[in-house]
Image (spheres, rainbow, N blue to C red):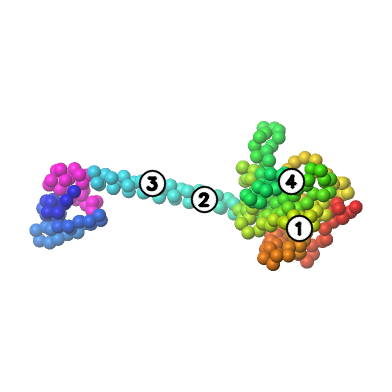
């Protein structure tokens, strides 16, 4: 479509002819001077083409541009709605975090089966399981005690070995914005930085029951049912400290030490006052 030299009529400036135009502006020569306008917006309200065929083609262009503009505005509005929704969610999370009271047993120890011993470290997340009975039967279990101060301890035991030989495979801090009571899918993801996997040799030196004890039966070491248990914040700190001292690789040792310090800060634990491990194995 060529608009050069096409006759037009403007409401204020009268009859003129198009001198030049591009995607955003148009210049028209009137009787006494040239005028520039926004193209194609000026047509319709202020400017009319004399050539009806060209005017019809231009209407199609204007309609298309209006549709594109409306779509762009719709997307902007959707983006604003999404931003408002995310902001409200952030405010809600901040309120939850601000009002959160530390539970003395807000750490999780997880029993990894053979498959999970690999997948837990590939995906750096575990699944809390499903509810076994009641109205919510079959729905994922919410790890309600877990918060941003929580860590997940990964453990395993060979089926032929006694429970006292359960060993620690690794540990991770929960994801930075994880809140257990808001967890709908049952998956507990790891922190982007604070995550540690032990070698087989290191794992052999980290027996779980060195730290964990059932206070009701302090010398009894049993894990009858369930994929996980909650346990004491101090016990997790003891484990992290021992892992830091166990690591021989300088980078891994530094990360483990940073993990320990971060954990103590999040759980209001004074590292210098941390008691020695006194789990069931230590009481035999």
Give the vertical position of 249 relative to 67 (above or below).
Answer: below
Residue 202, numbered circle: 1
Which numbered disc, 1 or 4, marks the residue that appears first in the sequence?
4
| Residue at x 79% of width, y 64% of height | 273
- 189 and 149: which one is in front? 189
Residues in magenta?
38-59
Q: Label 2: state its secondary structure.
A: helix
- Residue 80: tell me if it is visible: yes
| Residue at x 61% of width, y 57% of height | 192
Query: Horizontal and vertical percent for residue 142?
Result: 66, 43
* Label 1 with label 4: CB-CB less than 8 Å: no
Which numbered disc, 1 or 3, marks the residue that appears first in the sequence?
3
Q: Is 88 situated left or right of 137 in this image?
A: left
Residue 111, numbered circle: 4
Q: Is disc 2 surrounded by few (<14), some (14 to 19) or many (20+) residues within 10 Å?
A: few
- Residue 38: tell me if it is visible: no
Q: Label 4: state its secondary structure.
A: strand
Residue 74, numbered circle: 3
Residue identified by numbered label 2: 86
Q: Distance between the Cα atoms at labels 2 and 3?
A: 18 Å
Q: Is disc 1 surrounded by few (<14), some (14 to 19) or many (20+) residues within 10 Å?
A: some
Which numbered disc, 4 or 2, marks the residue that appears first in the sequence?
2
Query: Horizontal and vertical percent for residue 243?
Result: 75, 60
Q: Distance between the Cα atoms at labels 1 and 2?
A: 42 Å
Query: Horizontal and vertical percent for residue 90?
Result: 55, 52
């Amino acid at each position: 479509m060529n608009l050069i030299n096409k006759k037009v009529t403007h409401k204020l400036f009268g009859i003129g002819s198009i001198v030049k135009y591009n995607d955003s502006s148009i210049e028209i020569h009137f009787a006494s001077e040239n005028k520039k306008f926004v193209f194609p917006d000026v047509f319709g309200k202020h400017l009319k083409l004399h050539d009806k065929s060209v005017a019809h083609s231009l209407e199609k262009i204007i309609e298309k541009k209006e549709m594109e503009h409306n779509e762009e505005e719709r997307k902007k509005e959707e983006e604003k709605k999404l931003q408002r929704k995310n902001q409200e969610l952030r405010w809600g999370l901040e309120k939850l975090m601000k009002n959160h009271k530390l539970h003395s047993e807000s750490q999780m120890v997880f029993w990894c089966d053979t498959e999970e011993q690999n997948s837990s470290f590939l995906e750096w997340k575990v699944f809390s399981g499903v509810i076994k009975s009641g109205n919510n039967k079959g729905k994922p279990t919410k790890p309600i005690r877990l918060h941003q101060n929580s860590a997940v301890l990964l453990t395993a035991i060979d089926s032929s070995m006694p429970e006292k030989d359960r060993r620690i495979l690794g540990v991770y801090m929960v994801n930075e914005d994880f809140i257990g009571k808001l967890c709908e899918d049952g998956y507990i993801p790891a922190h982007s930085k604070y995550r540690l996997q032990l070698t087989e040799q290191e794992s052999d030196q980290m027996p779980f029951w060195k730290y964990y004890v059932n206070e009701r039966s302090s010398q009894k070491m049993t894990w009858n049912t369930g994929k996980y248990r909650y346990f004491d914040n101090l016990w997790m700190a003891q484990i992290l400290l021992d892992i830091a001292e166990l690591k021989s690789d300088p980078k891994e040792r530094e990360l483990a030490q940073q993990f320990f310090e971060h954990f103590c800060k999040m759980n209001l634990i004074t590292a210098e006052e941390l008691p020695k491990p006194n789990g069931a194995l230590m009481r035999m």
